[in-house]
Structure formats: structure tokens, C-alpha cells
Image (spheres, rainbow, N blue to C red):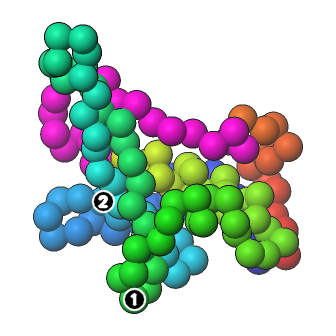
Amino acid sequence: MTRELINQEDFEAHLVLEANGDVTAMYRHISLTSVFQPIFNRAREVMGYEALCRVTDDNGQHICCTDIFYQCCDENWVIHQHNLDKLSRVVHLRNFSQYNVDCSLFLNVLPISAIRGLTPTRTIS
């Protein structure tokens, strides 16, 4: 049964605290981690960071993010996309909070996250 992640307990079940303090999400045989790309203003000062997702499979092989977010391979693909999108944002926010910097964080969001058709009680078996 595939269920939409809706509460803290659901998310915590997928999160791992690594030895270096980073948070990683584990979901359906893949892991999601964060990297942060600096964004500069015209004066060439860092004004913020874009959070980027790095994905690996169970064997540690890197996987292209678009393959994960756009090519889920079963009938529950909408729920998987939504879960991965939300998990990646949780991972990015937790990891970025460790840096204690005073600047903006830019997050990429899938349009599927704005669809109201997914409800907290929706379950597909």
C-alpha cells in the first residue's frame, strides 16, 4: 500500500542522521541528500543558496533527479512524486539549518505539490 506522507512521524520514518550531522532521506531503495549552490548578487556577494538534491540507489550509484521525480514506474507515481518532493524539502531545510547563515534558501518545488487532489487520508492499495 502506498500512502502520502502527511505528518512528522511519517517523515521521521524516512530520515537518517548521518555521522557528519547531515540528514538523508531513504525512500523506495533510493537516498536523497542535499548540496547547496551559492547564488550571487550583482556585487558578487552571496545572497542565498539554491538547495539541490543528490540521489543515489542502494548500490551508491548516482541517479539523475529527473529520472526519480518524473519517471516513477508504477500506478502510484503521483503519490511517490509528492512524497519525494516533500522529503527533499525536509532534508534541505534540516541540512541548511546547520549552517547558521543569514541569507536566503531557494527551494525547487514540483508543480504536483500544489494539486489539491491529494488529501491527508488518500491511500492507494
Which region is colored magenta? 93-113
Front position among marks 1 and 2: 1
x then y, percent, for residue 41 = 25, 15
- The quarter of the picture where residue 37 lies is top left
Q: Is residue 108 left or right of residue 103?
A: right
Q: Which tag, 1 or 2, sits closer to the chain's start?
A: 2
Quadrant assignment for the C terminus: bottom right
Most foreground residue, 90 or 62: 62
- Say which mark, if any, is on residue 8: none
Look at 58% across and 59% down and name the residue there. 66
Residue with the mark numbered 2: 23
Q: Amino acid at mark 2?
A: Val
Q: Look at label 1 and name its amino acid.
A: Asn
Quadrant assignment for the N terminus: bottom right
Pinpoint residue 5: horizontal percent, then vertical percent.
Answer: 63, 57
Residue 77's quadrant in the figure?
Answer: bottom right
Badge 1 crowding class, 10 Å Cα cut-off, few under 14, some 14 to 19, many 20 or more, is: few
Q: Residue at x 77, y 58 (%)?
A: 78
Q: Which mark is residue 59?
A: 1
Element type at mark 2: strand
- Residue neighbourhood size for the residue with mark 2, other residues' Cα within 10 Å, grouped as few (<14), some (14–19), many (≥20): many
Q: Is residue 118 above or below residue 116?
A: below
Locate residue 60, reporting x and y percent: 36, 82
Find numbered disc 1 in the image and state the secondary structure of the residue it sits on: loop
Which residue occupies the foreground of this view, 67 or 80? 67
Say if the magenta span includes residue 103: yes
Q: Determine if the magenta segment contains residue 5.
A: no
> Which of the two residues, 39 or 32, is positioned nearer the viewer here?
39
Question: Which residue shows up at 24% across the image and 23% down it?
Answer: 40
Q: Is residue 5 visible?
A: no
Per the model, the C-alpha gap separating discs 1 and 2 is: 19 Å
- Hey, which residue is sitting farthest top in the picture? 43
